[in-house]
Amino acid sequence: MKKCPLPINKTDIDVAKQLSELDGFVSDKQYKQLVVWLRDVNWPVFPYVAHFLVIKGVDASNGLWYALKSNKGTWKKNVVQYVLSQCPKSDLKKCSAWLPNYVTDPDIFGPDLATIEILIGSDMVELSWLEGWLNFKKKIGCQIVRSRSLA
C-alpha cells in the first residue's frame, strides 16, 4: 500500500501524477489537502488532482464537502464541474442528501447551475422541481438586470 503523495505547490506535477498510482487509504485530512488544489483550473496540478478525486468518488466526499461549504464560488464550481460531474451516477446517489440543496443556496451563482446539470442526468430529483428553480433564477436574474439598467 502506497502512502498518499500530496503536492507541495501548484507546480508539483511529479507528485500529482503519482496520485493515479495510489491504491491505498487516503484520510479525510489528506482529501481536504488535495481539494485545495482545485481552487484554480490553471494550476498545473489541477487536472491530476481532479482526476484522482473522480476515481475516488464518494470516498472523497468529506474533502469535497470541505470545498463546497466554503465561501469561494470558483472553488465550489470547480469541484462540481470537474469532479462531481465526472463521478459515476452510483457515487452521486450517495450525495443525494445534500447535492439537491446546493441548488437552493442563495449565496452562490454559477456552481448551482453546474449542479443542476448533474441533477438533470442523475434522477435524484423531480425534473419539475428543477424546472421551478430554473424559472425562479431566470426571473430573479431578469429583475437584477432591469434594476441595474434603471440605476
Image: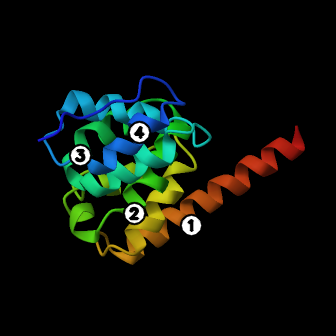
Which quadrant of the rendered structure holds the N terminus?
A: top left
Residue at image coords 48%, 37%: 13
Amino acid, disc 4: Ala
Residue at image coords 58%, 36%: 43
User: How far apart are the alpha carbons under marks 3 and 1?
Assistant: 44 Å
Element type at marker 3? loop
User: How far apart are the alpha carbons under marks 2 and 4?
Assistant: 19 Å
User: Is residue 5 at least partly visible in the picture?
Assistant: yes
* Residue 128 or residue 76, whichever sits in front: 76
Q: Compared with residue 27, is residue 92 higher up or lower down, i.e. above or below?
A: below
* Residue 11 or residue 59, whichever sits in front: 11
Front label number (2 vs 1): 2
Residue at image coords 49%, 53%: 112
Question: Which mark identifies residue 22?
Answer: 3
Amino acid, disc 1: Asn
Q: Which residue was labeled with disc 1?
A: 135
Front label number (2 vs 4): 4
Question: Which mark identifies residue 86?
Answer: 2
